[in-house]
Image (cartoon, helix red, strand yellow):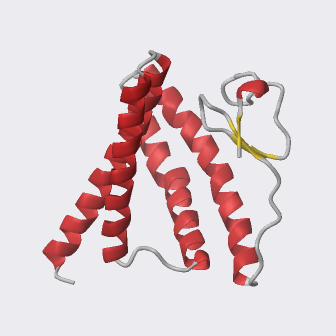
Amino acid sequence: MHTMTHEFLKSAFAGESQAHMKYILFADKAEQEGYHNIARLFRAIAYAEQVHAFNHLDALGGIGDTVTNLQTGVQGETYEVEEMYPAYKAVAELQEEKKAVRSMGWALEAEKIHAELYKSAKTQAAAGKDIQLGTVYICPLCGYTTVDQVPDKCPLCNVPGKKFRKF
């Protein structure tokens, strides 16, 4: 693939991915405000953006087998833990951006858990096995992730465990 096309596909993938996520969040807000059809419209278009993102990533050759995809997940989460969030958080601290510091700190801690979950899953998938996975619980405020047991309160942000989302 030509360099310019490759870069354009990467940029388009990033843009479509951001649009997808943004529209999902906009849908949630519209739903909270009682605009059910607007929420549905946001979700429908978010799905279209997801389709576009898939097509771009597929054209880039970015979707492999499960073991490869898990390795990509491990690398991404590890980069966020070791490089991205520590640097971003340090700048936010220097600039006294309290909400950004909190947001990045929460993400950093959650990403550590995600990396370990992916590593464990990759080991099993490499052996041709699926993982044994209980219920996954995610804190709706900070993204803290736990398997099988919900804490009384989130250890990162103190949200009551009963508010965790179940997967």
**35 sits to left or right of 123:** left
- Give the side of residue 58 with respect to residue 68, left or right: left
Question: In the rendered image, which quarter is residue 59 located in?
Answer: bottom left
**Residue 51, position as x, y percentages in the image:** 36, 59
Q: Quadrant of the N terminus?
A: bottom left
Image coords of residue 54 (percent x, y): 38, 64
Q: Residue at x 37, y 79 (%)?
A: 61
Q: Residue furthest top?
A: 33
How many marks the image carries: the answer is 0
Identity of the residue furthest to the left in this view: 4
Residue at x-position 17% and y-position 74% = 5
Q: Residue furthest front?
A: 37
The residue sitting at 49% across, 79% down in the picture is 64
Q: Is residue 162 left or right of residue 69?
A: right
The one nearer the camera, 52 or 17, is 52
Q: x, y (%) of residue 119?
A: 68, 67
Tell me: residue 83, above or below residue 57: above
Q: Nearer the viewer, residue 20 or 62?
A: 20
Q: In the displayed structure, would residue 52 be above or below residue 70?
A: above
Image-quadrant location for residue 66: bottom right
Give x and y (percent) for residue 22: 37, 38
Between 145 and 133, the one nearer to me in the picture? 133
Q: Is residue 49 left or right of residue 99?
A: left
